[in-house]
Amino acid sequence: MATAYIIEDEARSGELLKAKITSVTDYFDVIEIFTIPHIAYRSIIENAPDIIFSDIEMPQMSGIDVLEKIRHLNIPMVYVTAFSGYSIMAIKLQVFDYILKPVKEEELLNTINKFIAWKQLQMNRERDPKPSLNDIIAKQNSKISIHTLESINLISISAIVQVVGEENYSRFVFQDGKSLLSSKTLKNYESQLTPFGFIRVHKSHLVNMVFVDKVITRDGGYLLLRSLDLIPFARDRKTEILEWFDR
């Protein structure tokens, strides 16, 4: 049972965010809205929700104040605000994510998928520090939104073989041999895909380990994919890659 808290001093905005969350996922069994941050804080301490969506500018107690008081609980905090000027502060505070109002459903879906992957990773670490390949395959039923210059595409993670960085763009290569050029950088997708069994083999390459047929350790090291593509891995990534397959 997963619980999400929404802290928003404007009740209508809180209800709207709740409606958008329920429209993109049924992952949360409970979604509670708090219009008074102090009451939300007391409930967080008592009940420890799984994730918190919070406005920043609120009377008496800001979203930043809430985060500082609950940091020790390690609960993911997502700031939902109309003010873009807080983005640098959010990064410094190491919030889980940052969404600008009006909230776009695809951005909200990305955040929730990121949270689900994080939650699963925490559970896997408690159960087994190295999730099995079967665990990874099961998780890849989730989708990711891929932004191009003309559209936003919701793609099953299980269909992605590799992602190749091309300067400020990312090229997704799929199981059927087709590809899609995203207008976002490889770094943007690395954090989203790593919990789903993707590993950065060198500076410009993310590979879905599900599609690796062989690890070649000679001549620096290569991954042989089902597509017969041979992907070299960077020298400083070799140990991590070999450990991933040593399970």
Image: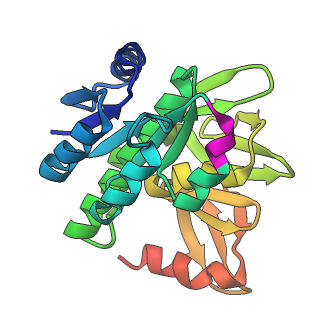
> What span is colored magenta in the figure?
83-87
Residue at 59% x, 61% y: name it.
92
The x and y percentages for residue 156 are 50, 33
Q: The N terminus appears in which quarter of the rendering?
A: top left
In-image side of 18 versus 55 (left or right): left
What predominant SS class does the magenta segment belong to?
Answer: helix
- Give the quarter of the figure containing the C terminus: bottom left
Can you see residue 190? no
Residue 177 is situated, as x and y percent measured from the top left of the image, at 68, 38
Relative to residue 53, is residue 153 drawn left or right?
right
Rendered view: 103 above or below 120: above
Q: Residue at x 71, y 64 (%)?
A: 230
Q: Residue at x 40, y 20 (%)?
A: 10
At x 17%, y 43%, the residue is: 43
* In magenta segment, residue 85: yes
Q: Nearer the viewer, residue 27 or 89?
A: 89
Relative placement, left or right, of 35 versus 245 is: left
Residue 82: image location, x then y, percent? 59, 28
The image position of residue 41, as x and y in percent, is: 25, 46
